[in-house]
Image (cartoon, helix red, strand yellow):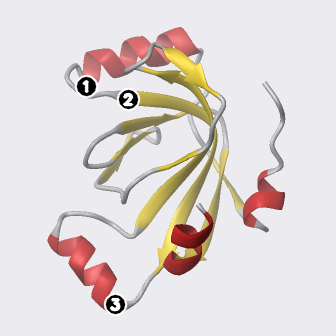
C-alpha cells in the first residue's frame, strides 16, 4: 500500500476516529448487519462537510440526505469485486452514519476503519476536484 498524504490533497483537516478492527471482522460484521447492501471497507478516508448554498442543503434534506460526502483514498475491500482497489473514490451524499463506522449513501455502504480526517470544503470545490 502506498502512503497518500491527505494534507497535501485536501489541506489542513482534523483527525476523526474510526473503528479499529481487522478486515475479516469488519467484513463479517457488515455482512451480518447489512446482508443485502454492497459495501466498501476503507482505511484512509476524509469526511467532507460540504459548505453548500442553503437551497442545495434544503434539496438534500428533502431527499433524506445530508451535506456530507466521503473521500476514500484506500479501499481495502469491495463486496462487489471481493478485492481491494488502489483508486480513490468520492461518495454521494450521506444518508445515515451509525456505530462510528457505517457511512450509508443511497447506493453504497462504506465501513470506516482506522482514523480518518474531517474537513469542511465548498461543494463546488469537491465536485470540481474530486
Neighbours of disc 2 within 10 Å: few (<14), some (14-19), many (20+):
many
Q: Earlier in the sequence, mark 1 or mark 2?
A: 1
| Residue 5 vs residue 87, the one in the foreground | 87
Q: Earlier in the sequence, mark 3 or mark 1?
A: 1
Quickly name the residue at label 2.
39
- Dot label at residue 34: 1
Q: Are marks 1 and 2 in contact (CB under 8 Å)?
A: yes
Which quarter shows the C terminus?
A: bottom right
Real-space CA distance between mark 1 and mark 2, rounded to the nearest whole angstrom: 9 Å
Quickly name the residue at label 3.
54
Instruction: Provide the secondary structure element on which disc 3 rests.
Output: helix
| Residue 12 vs residue 56, the one in the foreground | 56
Neighbours of disc 3 within 10 Å: few (<14), some (14-19), many (20+):
few
Real-space CA distance between mark 2 and mark 3, rounded to the nearest whole angstrom: 30 Å
* Residue positioned 47% across, 19% down in the render: 26
Vertical placement of 98 versus 60: above or below? above
Amino acid at each position: 500500500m502506498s502512503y497518500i498524504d491527505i494534507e497535501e490533497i485536501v489541506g489542513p483537516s482534523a483527525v476523526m476516529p474510526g473503528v479499529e478492527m481487522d478486515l475479516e471482522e469488519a467484513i463479517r460484521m457488515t455482512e451480518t448487519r447489512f446482508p443485502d447492501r454492497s459495501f466498501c471497507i476503507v482505511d484512509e478516508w476524509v469526511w467532507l462537510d460540504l459548505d453548500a448554498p442553503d437551497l442545495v442543503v434544503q434539496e438534500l434534506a428533502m431527499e433524506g440526505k445530508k451535506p456530507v460526502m466521503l473521500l476514500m483514498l484506500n479501499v481495502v475491500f469491495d463486496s462487489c469485486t471481493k478485492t481491494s482497489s488502489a483508486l480513490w473514490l468520492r461518495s454521494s451524499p450521506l444518508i445515515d452514519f451509525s456505530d462510528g463506522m457505517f457511512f450509508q449513501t443511497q447506493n453504497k455502504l462504506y465501513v470506516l476503519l482506522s482514523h480518518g480526517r474531517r474537513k469542511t470544503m465548498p461543494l463546488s470545490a469537491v465536485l470540481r476536484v474530486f
